[in-house]
């Protein structure tokens, strides 16, 4: 393997992505444009960005390990995300847009009160920094092992790069790079898949060499109960996680918010089949991997079939997918800190310039915290288990009450805190104390069922009781007044801001078109240099080149009133 070519590919794409962040350095005029794209982000960009925000190296490490060991069930598990997105599109995404909130935390404050918001902000920030810091580690390990680079400097370097374009450019920088990351990752996998099949003798050779139960929808410990629990969990996660909610609130209408979630669902119906076949194929080539070595199945198939340059492209896609997930969380954590803590509690009269400075500074602060967590992961061990457990422990208690509040006029702040507190306590007991004191441990399926099911049952019980007493929460009545005032304020059109939002969105579409053009050129160069897969690489490059016409055409359709623009320039 020629590490030099692969390293050059990674560095060139990384430099290009950082340059994109710098291009957006001057586009964020206020919090709405910096964190919500002026609430006018095209739905297809929001949907692709949401899709990439769900990815990380863990997709290849964790699900790749399951695909290698158990086969098709890894795809079945990921299809639960498609179901969760469909439910979100039909019922939850338009509700979030209807709230008029910039962040989920803002809605929680307005609907459930300041005490609930403070509690949720503390827990959400802690969980987000830990999980996203954790997923930075496996991709740093992948790049380090593949290119023979030291792990610690590699982790720090990749982390700093991730923070840089998020802190500089805001939501549009995150979304534009998400699109580029989606294209790079898709190109890499579409090149990897046929080369993998070729290596194993086609689909017939592959199917004959794997176990008889390899194509079963359910397999091993991943039972119907586990899958059903994951469906419920992903309805809550995709519909209520703060990083996901930001994609529904940053578009222009409830209809667009639905389209964001529908696009995510469609992509998660197709993509798991494409992503998971390479490690499944490696099972036919080398069935001897056991234990933690199965987590390297994806990297091993890449090393086996990808020539120099294309391996670098795949590693770039893996890293970009992790940074897409991490920087989305970073953007939201920073948004919550700036909008809901600094502006909401510390300095309500802060100017737009002050708020943008705080936003960028907090991005660096929380980003450095993520790097610190990533550096501690080797000492903690069991990264996949840790991340899944944290999600099971905190997901239901944190996500279920705000989602319930979108529909209920009876839920109040006191009940919300009780449900969250009971849920977290029970989940922590079964995860930490029960194995020590009772020698009892829940299965992964039961862990998720209890984690999500208990808060939902408590909320349902209260809702039925409150309905029997005809109780309406005082917080709900206050929320209605706040919502009406927001509706009135929204009618006051700021023409200068409207022009800036259109200019920012047109610029973003132009940058996406340029980024796709750059990617196509890079792929053509790699197709000329590669020792195998040249035709496939050139074909993918042509598809990317044609795809660049879509955002280019969309940018031309964004019309700015010439009169307003001239007055603004004067």
Image (cartoon, rainbow, N blue to C red):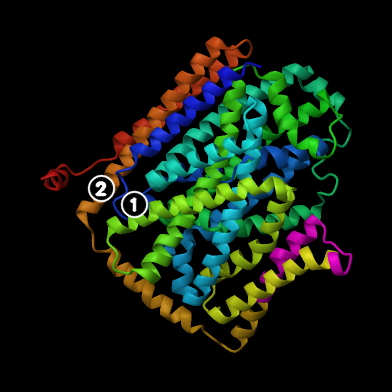
Going from N to C along the chain, the mark reached first, 2 or 1, is 1
Residue 174, visible in the rendered structure:
no
Distance between the Cα atoms at labels 2 and 1? Answer: 9 Å
Q: In the image, which disc is placed on residue 33?
A: 1
Q: Quadrant of residue 546?
A: top left
Q: Considering the image in quadrants, where does the C terminus appear?
A: top left
Which residue is at the front of the view, 394 or 137? 137
Read off the residue under disc 2: 500
Q: Residues within 10 Å of mark 2 (few under 14, many from 20)?
A: some
| Dominant secondary structure (helix, strand or loop) of the stretch shown in magenta | helix
537 lies left or right of 106: right
Q: Is residue 117 magenta?
A: no
**Mark 1 and mark 2 in contact (Cβ < 8 Å)?**
yes
Q: Residue at x 42, y 28 (%)?
A: 548
Q: Residue at x 40, y 60 (%)?
A: 338
Residue 497 position, x and y percent, is 24, 53
34 lies left or right of 387: left
**Depicted 355 relative to depicted 304: above or below:** below
Q: Residues within 10 Å of mark 1 (few under 14, many from 20)?
A: many
The residue range painted magenta reads 436-459
Residue 196 position, x and y percent, is 71, 22
Element type at marker 2? helix
**Depicted 376 relative to depicted 94: above or below:** above
Element type at marker 1? helix
> Which residue is at the far bottom?
469
Residue 163 position, x and y percent, is 47, 44
204 lies left or right of 105: right
Q: Considering the image in quadrants, where does the N terminus appear?
A: top right
Q: Quadrant of residue 191?
A: top right
Residue 543 position, x and y percent, is 50, 23
Residue 155, visible in the rendered structure:
yes
Q: Is residue 444 magenta?
A: yes
């Amino acid at each position: 393997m020629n590490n030099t070519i692969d390293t050059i590919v990674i560095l060139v794409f990384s430099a290009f992505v950082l340059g994109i962040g710098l291009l957006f350095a001057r586009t964020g005029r206020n919090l709405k444009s910096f964190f919500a794209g002026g609430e006018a982000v095209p739905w297809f960009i929001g949907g692709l960005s949401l899709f990439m925000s769900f990815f990380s190296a863990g997709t290849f490490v964790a699900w790749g390990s399951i695909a290698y060991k158990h086969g098709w069930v890894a795809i079945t598990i990921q299809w639960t995300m498609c179901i969760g997105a469909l439910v979100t599109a039909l019922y939850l995404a338009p509700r979030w847009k209807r709230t008029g909130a910039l962040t989920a935390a803002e809605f929680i404050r307005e609907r459930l009160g300041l005490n609930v918001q403070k509690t949720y902000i503390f827990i959400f920030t802690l969980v987000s920094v830990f999980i996203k810091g954790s997923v930075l580690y496996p991709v740093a390990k992948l790049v380090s092992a593949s290119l023979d680079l030291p792990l610690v400097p590699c982790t720090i370097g990749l982390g700093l790069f991730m923070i840089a374009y998020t802190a500089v450019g805001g939501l549009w920088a995150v979304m534009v790079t998400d699109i580029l990351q989606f294209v790079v990752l898709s190109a890499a996998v579409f090149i990897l898949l046929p080369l993998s099949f070729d290596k194993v003798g086609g689909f017939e050779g592959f199917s004959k060499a794997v176990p008889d139960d390899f194509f079963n929808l359910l397999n091993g410990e991943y039972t119907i109960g586990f899958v059903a629990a994951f469906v419920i969990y992903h309805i809550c996660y995709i519909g209520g996680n703060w990083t996901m909610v930001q994609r529904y609130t940053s578009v222009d209408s409830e209809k667009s918010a639905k389209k964001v979630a529908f696009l995510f669902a469609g992509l998660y119906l197709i993509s798991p089949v494409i992503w998971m076949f390479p490690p499944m194929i490696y099972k036919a080539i080398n069935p001897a991997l056991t234990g933690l070595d199965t987590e390297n199945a994806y990297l091993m198939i890449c090393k086996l079939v990808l020539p120099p340059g294309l391996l670098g492209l795949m590693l770039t896609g893996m890293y970009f997918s992790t940074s897409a997930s991490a920087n989305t969380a970073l953007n939201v954590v920073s948004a919550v800190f700036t909008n809901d803590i600094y502006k909401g509690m510390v300095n309500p009269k802060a100017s737009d310039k002050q708020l943008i400075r705080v936003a960028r500074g907090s991005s660096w602060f929380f980003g450095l915290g993520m790097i610190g967590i990533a550096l501690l992961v080797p000492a903690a061990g069991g990264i996949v288990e840790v991340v899944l457990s944290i999600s099971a422990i905190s997901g239901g208690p944190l996500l279920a009450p705000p989602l319930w509040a979108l529909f209920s006029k009876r839920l109040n702040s006191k009940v919300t805190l009780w449900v969250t507190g009971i849920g977290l306590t029970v989940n922590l007991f079964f995860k930490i104390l029960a194995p020590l004191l009772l020698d009892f441990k829940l299965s992964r399926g039961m862990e998720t069922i209890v984690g999500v099911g208990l808060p939902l049952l408590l909320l349902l019980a209260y809702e039925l009781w409150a309905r029997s007493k005809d109780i309406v929460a005082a917080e709900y009545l206050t929320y209605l007044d706040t919502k009406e005032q927001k509706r009135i304020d929204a009618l006051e059109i700021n023409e200068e801001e409207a022009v800036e939002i259109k200019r920012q969105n047109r610029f973003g579409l132009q940058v996406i078109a340029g980024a796709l053009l750059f990617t196509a050129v890079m792929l053509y160069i790699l197709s000329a240099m590669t020792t195998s897969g040249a035709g496939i690489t050139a074909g993918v490059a042509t598809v990317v080149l044609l795809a660049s016409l879509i955002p280019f055409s969309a940018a031309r359709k964004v019309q700015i009133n010439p009169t307003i623009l001239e007055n603004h320039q004067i």
